Image (cartoon, rainbow, N blue to C red):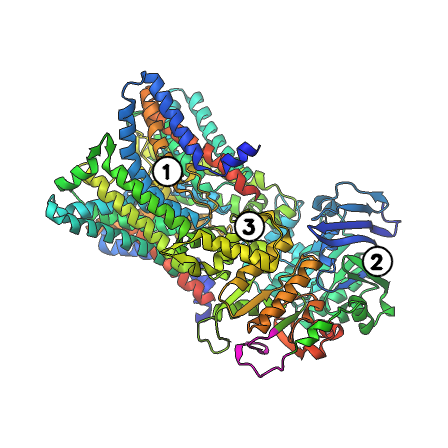
Amino acid sequence: MNADRLEIVTLQGVARRFGAVRALDGVDLSVLRGQCLGLVGHNGAGKSTLMNVLAGTLNADRGVLRIGDAEVQGFSAAVAKANGIRCVFQELSLCPNLTVAENTRIFHAALSGRGWRGRAKALIRAKLDEIFPGHGIDPGDMVGDLSIGKRQIVEIACAFTQTETPLRLVILDEPTSSLDAVTSKQLLEFVRKEVDGGLACILISHVLGEVLDYADEIVVMKDGLIVAQDDAATFTRARLVEAMGNVAKAADKDVEARRVIRGNAPVVVQANAGAALTAHQGEIVGLAGLAGHGQTKLLLDIFEATGSKRLATRVEGPVAFVAGDRQTDGVFHRWSISANVGVRSLRRMVRRGVIDPVAEAVMGDEWQRKINIKTPDMGSNILSLSGGNQQKALFARALASDAQIILMDDPMRGVDFGTKLEVYEIIRQEAARGRTFLWYSTETEELHNCDHIYVFRDGAIVADMSNAELTEEKILSHSFQETA
Amino acid sequence: MWRQVTSPRVLRAILPAASFVILLAAIFYVQPRAMSYFGMNLMLQYTVPIALATIAQMFIITVNDLDLSIGAFVGLTACIGATLLADSPLLGVLALLACVGAYAALGALIYWRNLPSIVVTLGMSFVWLGGAVLILPTPGGTAPGWVKAIMGLKTPVVPFPIIATLVIGISVHLVLMRSSYGTVLRGVGGNPRAVKRAGWSLLKAKMVMYAAAGFFGVLSGLSLIGLTSAADAHIADRYTLYAIAGVILGGGEFVGGRVSPIGAIIGALTLALTGSFLTFLRISPDWQIGAQGGILILVLALRALIKRQEG
Amino acid sequence: MTAFKTLSEKPWIWSFLGMIAIWAATAIYTGGKGSADVITAALSFATFTAIVGVGQMFVIATGPGNVDLSIPSTIALSGAVAMKVMDGSNAMLPVGAAASLGCGLAVGVLNYLLIRVLRIPPIIATLSSSFLILSTAIAYGRGLKIKPPPLLAEFTTAQVWGLPVLALFFAVFAFGMSVVLNRTIYGRSVLAIGQNMRAARLAGIKVERTRFLTYALSAVLAATCGFLLAGFSGGASLNMGQEYLLGSIAVVVIGGTSVAGGKANLPGILGASMFMFLLVTMLNTFGASAGVRLVMTGLIIVAVITIAGGEDAQS
């Protein structure tokens, strides 16, 4: 019934919040038959949330979702699937203990009964051969034994297989992130061909060349909104970068006041990720680039290397880690705020062999004042705090400790603006006192607080620049690959 | 060629079979008389109930749980088999069906409340044991004639235990490893989120696996009394340990849905043979259980070594 | 709602309430006859459960998947070794105690090495080591019928004002362990690891050292229990540890320690140990058979874990 209508899916005023963060802030979008829609945007622009809403794995807080011309209530993954909407997620969703063909079977309820294995094998082999000729994957291969790239190939091919419901829309989230140039091109050519045959496709990629070359229309997102939408032909690389960037520059007058001359202070961290990274005492070093391009891994390497004399990584002095992913890396959810702040400094609280609860409370109260944690009682559970204040508690944990080097793993995720400004100020003060900060941030504005910035792409440092040289365009341009 | 043979994956796959063959060779070397129909029958007669309990445990491990009550459960079903089933078959069958149903309900409870399976099954082991004591307060009872007849079958050329374990292994392999729903069940162990996203019910999968474990527990109990004729609440206490060890010796992993029914059968055979081997070596039976623990650790050590090689 | 919240924040209260309720029920049934004796007996037996329960609690508190299944065999080994070393002589008492603790330490080291070096999940590591330990105990203690030194037997059965001396000593020890749990770096490390091992490591906690100490502590306490139990029951027997596998886990769970890790409760173990013993006594008084007692014990444990576990599933 949708065949004569052009729109496959239409979104109207779709919004979704995560706590204080507006991931989607009223998005209107329609995807048409025979259209490849390119979707670009910087970290946290809302691309992934939008995708999840379309795939039915996240529900929108408000807004309307139409399939064809019928408004859908209670959209879910099952409804999406029944309407021929498929999504290849960035995290791999295959079962590693099953073969390629068996994973295809999990995907298709219709593959059952006598001879299902043969049918599954034929189905996935045909699709693999069609999209990725020369892929070298056997349907009988165990997925866990395949390389990451091959797993991604399997996942993509699996998404394009058809049994009962015809395929209408395929959403590809960074499909080429683990693929080499040849397979990437194979995939994109295939997508182009399918789209010309009437399929709709949403292509999300940080390789701008891919989007420019293969999409019919490009949508640029920023801060949960669509900020530009036009025919792909009207975009150039420069225009895309400009559209993704911030129009209003962060005011960074007072930052300029404390610019240290690099190299005068002793080196405290020396690490390597494709190129050398150096941090001097009292410096704020920024790690930039798109999320998940090796910044966290480098921070963890530095954390692990503390105390050990490894050749590649040298760390002088005690280290503390400020987690960005609070729930998995930072917060002890059963403990009070004070206990969460004090856990890194227990050694200093020991009086006559046991931890002095008074010392712990004193430290908690002291840092509540210093960093302005908004709570009536530092003895209450850490989860009673808002996200931003939990983050402040984690900052307090690091700053209250004896650490001279502080590693920050994009800690400002989901933190409100006021809190951010307070924390920036504290970081500058502490740096002035001789502490060194290694600060991974996905927000370009934040990088203006850093003295020196390293840009990461695909797990390696691809550029470095001083604060004076820093521009948003430069960061974006290094973060997004030149060509496909 | 050599590189291919020594590749970690191949090594890991042949490890269970290799340990079995080496053990068997050692037995034949120490005691050549064991290499006969009668000798094999004697050495392997208890493998059938152990293999069935191992398969039951394997179903639970497939969905990333662990059953610490399977021994007590086998004891209970043995007691039911030697009393109710022999005296009033209908009631006996109903009781055994209720046992399987209880296992399915356990699976549902563990999934629904997200409970740690070890604590729940440890608690249930008391319930099973208590039930067995209630049914059969003192050792005794009689196995139904047909059960004894099956277990006492004299098959030509190849001893019955070998044929029986092979049949069990192959049929479970067909259901779990080859059937289309078996694939989904294993997928639950590998990546539950993906399976759920594809539209399958995890609750149903857990219940099916627990029910299957209960079913094989019943079979294990019945086959055990077929050999011993009488039952006792504590008859199968050691089976909990045997079953876990059997799955692991057979190449199964504790998490991730990587299991192998054929491997589990080989693991059970290896465990049963260890006892005979130690007897032939005139090592006191005191060390039997220790040797089984030692073999388990050895196999796990070898596997850790291979894994490190895999990088 | 607030009252419920306050109570649920003190999870040990349930085990004590249960204990009192059961004791009262028994006392009413018997018309108050022998109620004091029941308490004395309960204190004696509960002490042994509580000793291993404390070790198990620290292990379980280090997070999901951590359980020490080698406790029963360690009890058996320690008892057998101690009895043989002492050979009924008071003079050898310190040597016997040292040998017993040495057994415990060795088991702890073995368990930790299996977990660390072979990267086996703790359940399987302690399970397979329990095979080895039990065999050693069987082989070493074959035909063992040695009476404990009189002094040990006296000490473990002595009473002051109707209270077992052992229970009094244990009360002091339990208080000490409660301080260790809540007020030392080690205790805090255990709780932090149990909540989130990755966050604990990133917060600078010595994860491996803590895990080693925890498994060593559990084994040493099991060994202590074996030593005392052999003295209490007039000699070591190979299956004297058997009931402590479920017993140790049950008192930890009923006592309000979270099986999801990171939350431990020492007073709860004391209440739960008493509760478990009194439950059996009550069922005995009511004339319940052994089977009913077992079924009830099992069902209560499953019920407690179902109620207590639900809270963790949501967070």
Per the image, the residue denoted by label 3 is A378
Q: In this view, does C145 lie to the left or right of C66?
A: left
Q: Can residue B278 be seen in this view?
A: yes
Q: In this view, does A144 lie above or below B70?
A: below
Q: Give the range drawn in magenta.
A: A260-284
Per the image, the residue denoted by label 1 is B71
Q: Are marks 2 and 3 on the same chain?
A: yes
Amino acid type of the residue that numbered disc 1 sits on in the rendered structure: Gly
Task: Point out the tag, 2 or 3, that comes first from the N-terminus.
Answer: 2
- Give the SS element for disc 2: loop
Amino acid type of the residue that numbered disc 2 sits on in the rendered structure: Gly
Amino acid type of the residue that numbered disc 3 sits on in the rendered structure: Met
x, y percentage for residue C44? Answer: 26, 34
Q: Locate the C terminus of chain A and report the quarter of the image it occupies.
A: bottom right
User: Which residue does the image show at 81% across and 60% down from the upper left?
Assistant: A37
User: Which residue does the image show at 55% across and 71% down from the upper left?
Assistant: A435
Question: Going by the picture, which residue comes out furthest to the bottom?
Answer: A264
Q: Locate the N terminus of chain A and report the quarter of the image it occupies.
A: top right
Q: Quadrant of residue C49?
A: top left
User: Which residue does the image show at 84% across and 43% down from the upper left?
Assistant: A70
CA–CA distance between discs 1 and 3? 50 Å
Residue A34 — which label? Answer: 2
Q: In this view, does C141 lie to the left or right of C169?
A: left
Q: In this view, does B222 lie to the left or right of A52?
A: left
Q: Does the magenta stretch include residue A267?
A: yes
Q: Disc 1 vs disc 3: which is toward the camera? A: 3
Q: Which chain does the numbered disc 3 sit on?
A: A
x, y percentage for residue A132? Answer: 68, 65
- Give the SS element for disc 3: loop
